[in-house]
């Protein structure tokens, strides 16, 4: 997954100016560990797109 992040995240930062590359590179693996600890079904098999869809679906991308 780390290799996938290194390819995908720079592409996202080109399209979304509010994203700064180091943030997703740090936060996505952290979220993946939390999902695994919470025993979210099949989360360990999710690719970067799956994780980003989860973030958007549950509105985790906004600061509250």
Image: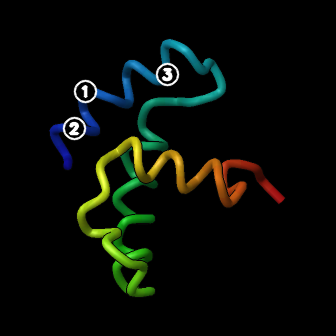
| Nearer-N-terminus badge (3/2) | 2
26 and 7: which is toward the camera: 7
Mark 2 residue crowding within 10 angstroms, few (<14) / some (14–19) / many (20+): few
Q: Position of residue 22 (x, y in %)?
A: 42, 38
Q: Position of residue 36 (x, y in %)?
A: 34, 79
- CB contact under 8 Å: marks 2 and 1: yes
| Nearer-N-terminus badge (1/3) | 1
Residue at mark 2 to residue at mark 1: CA–CA distance? 5 Å
Question: Residue at the location (41% across, 50% down)?
Answer: 50
Residue under label 1: 7
> Split into 4 quadrants, where in the image is the C terminus?
bottom right
Question: Residue at the location (72% across, 55% down)?
Answer: 59
Residue under label 3: 13
7 and 41: which is toward the camera: 41
Answer with left or right where residue 22 lies relative to residue 57. Answer: left
Question: Which element carries disc 2, helix, strand or loop?
Answer: helix
Mark 1 residue crowding within 10 angstroms, few (<14) / some (14–19) / many (20+): few
Residue at mark 3 to residue at mark 2: CA–CA distance? 14 Å
Residue under label 2: 4
Question: Which element carries disc 3, helix, strand or loop?
Answer: helix
Looking at the rendered image, the disc whose residue lies closer to the viewer, 3 or 2, is 2
Residue sitting farthest toward the top: 14
- CB contact under 8 Å: marks 1 and 3: no
Image: 54 above or below 25 = below
Query: What coloring was used for the rendering?
Result: rainbow
């Amino acid at each position: 997954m780390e290799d996938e992040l290194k390819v995908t995240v720079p592409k996202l930062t080109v399209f979304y100016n509010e994203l700064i590359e180091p943030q997703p590179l740090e936060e996505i693996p952290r979220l993946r560990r939390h999902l695994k600890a919470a025993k979210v079904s099949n989360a360990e098999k999710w690719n970067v797109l799956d994780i980003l869809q989860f973030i958007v679906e549950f509105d985790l991308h906004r600061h509250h």
